[in-house]
Amino acid sequence: IIFPKWKIILISLVIILMILSEFYLAKINFNFSSSSVFFVSAFLFFIVQSSFMIIVAFDNFDIDIRKNFVFWIAFARLFYYLIIMFIYIYPSLIENGYKIKLYNQTNTAINTFANVLENIIYGVSFLCHKKKI
């Protein structure tokens, strides 16, 4: 796959944001956790990357999209990161968001659901890619 210039720029911006969030934003007292900035920037990168792979999979007219394992892997990643994105954003917006017991239980439930769903979709991709012996 040939990477367009916008993707190279996006990767560079994500790397710069991650470095800034680790070294600079952690030393400044913001209302939000610096780790959430790191995770959200990584998640946004994975969402854009998975979306790009889905678009590339749709451009291939030779293979049925339901039998394209790359599509299913990209779809699983996209769906997973879209589900868990708000887990890292919401507690940063409220005071003591990470210390609330209900939030921690909800976080565990949502993350478990997202992991199970992602692994089921990965299973579909393995079924699409199996080879006859």
Image (cartoon, rainbow, N blue to C red):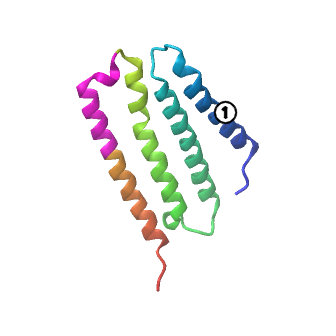
- Residue drawn at 53 percent across, 58 percent down: 71
Residue with the mark numbered 1: 13
> Most extreme residue toward the bottom, as rendered?
133
- List x then y, in percent, for residue 76: 45, 52
Taking 20 as reference, is 121 above or below it?
Answer: below
- List x then y, in percent, for residue 124: 41, 64
- Mark 1 burial class by Cα count in 10 Å: few <14, some 14-19, many 20+: some
- Residue drawn at 35 percent across, 14 percent down: 95
Magenta residues span 96-112
Apparent side of residue 58 relative to residue 97 in the rendered image (left or right): right
Apparent side of residue 87 relative to residue 66 in the rendered image (left or right): left
Apparent side of residue 50 relative to residue 11 in the rendered image (left or right): left
Taking 119 as reference, is 97 above or below it?
Answer: above
Quadrant showing the N terminus: bottom right
Closest to the observer, 63 or 44: 44
Apparent side of residue 99 relative to residue 67 in the rendered image (left or right): left
Residue 15, quarter of picture:
top right
- Residue drawn at 73 percent across, 54 percent down: 2
- Residue drawn at 47 percent across, 86 percent down: 133
Q: Is residue 111 magenta?
A: yes
Q: Amino acid at mark 1?
A: Leu
Instruction: Characterize the magenta stretch by its predominant secondary structure.
Output: helix
Taking 65 as reference, is 110 above or below it?
Answer: above
- List x then y, in percent, for residue 35: 47, 28
- List x then y, in percent, for residue 86: 41, 31
Q: Is residue 36 magenta?
A: no
Secondary structure type for disc 1: helix
